[in-house]
Image: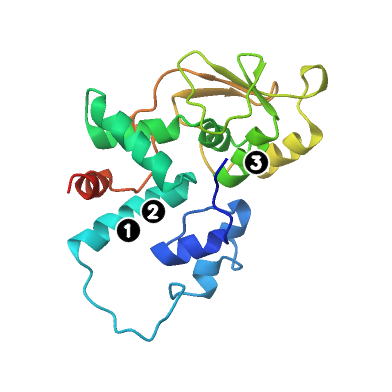
Amino acid sequence: MARYTDASCRQCRRIGEKLFLKGERCYTPRCAVERRKNPPGDRSLKRRRASDWSLQLREKQKARFSYGVLERQFRKYFDMARERPGVTGDNLLQYLERRLDNVVYRLAFAGSRKQGRQLVTHGHFTVNDKKMDIPSYLVETGDVVKWKGANGSIPEFGKTIMESGGRLSTPGWLKVDPDKGQAEVLGEPTLGAIESDIDVRLIVEFYSK
């Protein structure tokens, strides 16, 4: 399973803004974007005016980095979104939001999407009472996502994660029961319920060239 293994903070610095890839650390002065304003790499070159293509590329990379998806898989989501009825950009965001690692993050069962991916890969969650260790699994309406603990209980480390979370409000398309450590998918994510500043219009323009 391919994944990004370099420093996550380099991605935020490359984009030039916080993507909240490292959970609580991103809210502290230790955040790399706060300490090092410049992007990684050679800074000796003169800054030029950004072209339309570079702005589109930046927005595409921003979406990729935020959701922890590599280029080949991101392009697959885009092709799926383009073939589906409706607005391509909105469809793309819906597919990304429905990923299991993102759902775990949105439910505050993980401090970041990266941690959510790790927890899912290690088999700490079930979907409809079946163990699910595929981070890219797309949840459907009616699915129940639950912590996988002994006798149906929440693992101790899971309780710690949930207690330290809470910065994000649970979106309306998910109904969470923190006492049972589970949540139900009420429907597909709507554009208004997705807390994102990604300009999907630029991504569509990038792939339409």
Q: Residues within 10 Å of mark 1 (few under 14, many from 20)?
A: some
On the question of residue 195 being in view, the answer is no
Q: What residue do we see at 77% from left, 38% from top?
A: 157
Q: Residue 45: x and y, percent?
A: 33, 84
Q: Label 2 near label 3: C-beta < 8 Å?
A: no
Q: Is residue 62 left or right of residue 52?
A: right
On the question of residue 42 being in view, the answer is yes
Alpha-carbon distance for marks 3 and 2?
Answer: 21 Å
Q: Is residue 146 above or below residue 191?
A: above
- Image-quadrant location for residue 41: bottom left
Per the image, the residue denoted by label 3 is 118
Q: Residues within 10 Å of mark 2 (few under 14, many from 20)?
A: many
Hey, what amino acid is under mark 2? Lys
Helix, strand or loop for disc 3: helix
Q: What residue do we see at 78% from left, 30% from top?
A: 155
Hey, what amino acid is under mark 3? Gln
Per the image, the residue denoted by label 2 is 62
- Image-quadrant location for residue 159: top right
The answer to which of 31 and 55 lies nearer the viewer is: 55
Helix, strand or loop for disc 1: helix
Hey, what amino acid is under mark 1? Arg
Q: Residue 206: x and y, percent?
A: 23, 50
Q: Which mark is residue 58?
A: 1
Q: Label 2 near label 1: C-beta < 8 Å?
A: yes
Q: Residue 128: x and y, percent?
A: 60, 14
Q: What residue do we see at 58% from left, 24% from top?
A: 176
Q: What residue do we see at 51% from left, 32% from top?
A: 136
